[in-house]
Every structure is written in structure tokens, then in C-alpha cells.
Amino acid sequence: MLALHFLFISGAEIFFILFIVVMVFGADKVPGIAKGLGKGMRQLRDATDDIKREIKNSADKQGIDTSFTDDIKKEIDEVKKNVSDVTGTIKRQ
């Protein structure tokens, strides 16, 4: 059985929240709200990418070695894989 869980919110709670949103804003306004939220999230992602790029460029100009961040990312990915391997068998039961 596939359960929908997003930030510890069950499917019924998500449905209730969507119902309240439709009741408050109306069905014709919901797509516009979703579009605005999507644009906002995209702008936030672009801004964080720009900040990361500027920090990396500054570090490169100053001669700071940033190669350790790649090692950290590899270690984090390995830990995530190991955790998912362990929890995957638990979730299937």
C-alpha cells in the first residue's frame, strides 16, 4: 500500500488543506496562486545558485582550496545510500 506522506502530513490532511484553499480563494484563483508559488520557488532556487556560484568564484580567486566540499558531498551521498538501504527493507514490511 502506497501512503502519501509529505512532511508528516497524511493524505486526508492534504485534502482538507486543499479544500480550505479552494473555499477561501475560489477554484478560479488556485491555478494563479500555484503559478505564483512556483515562480517564487524558482526565484529562490536561482538566487541560492547565484550565491553559491559567487562564493565558489570568490574562493577560486583567493586561491582557497574547495575540493574538500566534493569529498563531503560524496560522503553524504554514501551515507544517504546506506541509510536508504537499511530503511528500505523496513519500509517494505
Image (cartoon, grey):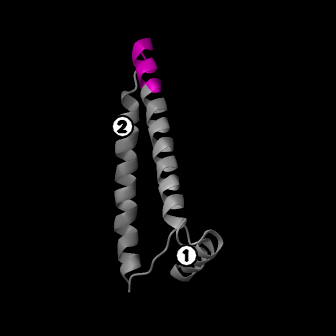
Give x and y (percent) for residue 74: 34, 44
For disc 1, the neighbor class at 10 Å (few under 14, some 14 to 19, many from 20) is: some
Region in magenta: 54-64
Q: Amino acid at mark 2?
A: Asp
Q: Would you name the residue on which mark 1 appears? A: 14
Q: Is residue 23 magenta?
A: no
Q: Is residue 70 above or below residue 34?
A: above
For disc 2, the neighbor class at 10 Å (few under 14, some 14 to 19, many from 20) is: few
Which residue sits at x=52%, y=54%?
37
Residue 26 left/right relative to 45: right
Q: Earlier in the sequence, mark 2 or mark 1?
A: 1
Which residue sits at x=47%, y=25%?
55
Task: Give residue 90's quadrant in the image.
Answer: bottom left
Q: Which mark is residue 71?
A: 2
Residue 46 left/right relative to 88: right
Task: Give residue 9's quadrant in the image.
Answer: bottom right
- Are the residues at dot 2 and dot 1 in contact (C-beta closer than 8 Å)? no
Give x and y (percent) for residue 82: 36, 60
Q: Amino acid at mark 1?
A: Ile
Magenta segment main secondary structure = helix
Q: Helix, strand or loop at disc 2?
A: helix
Q: Is residue 13 above or below residue 39?
A: below
Which residue sits at x=52%, y=69%?
28
Task: Give residue 83's quadrant in the image.
Answer: bottom left
Residue 76 left/right relative to 18: left
Observer-nearest residue: 65 or 33?
Answer: 33
Q: Helix, strand or loop at disc 1?
A: helix
Give x and y (percent) for residue 92: 36, 80
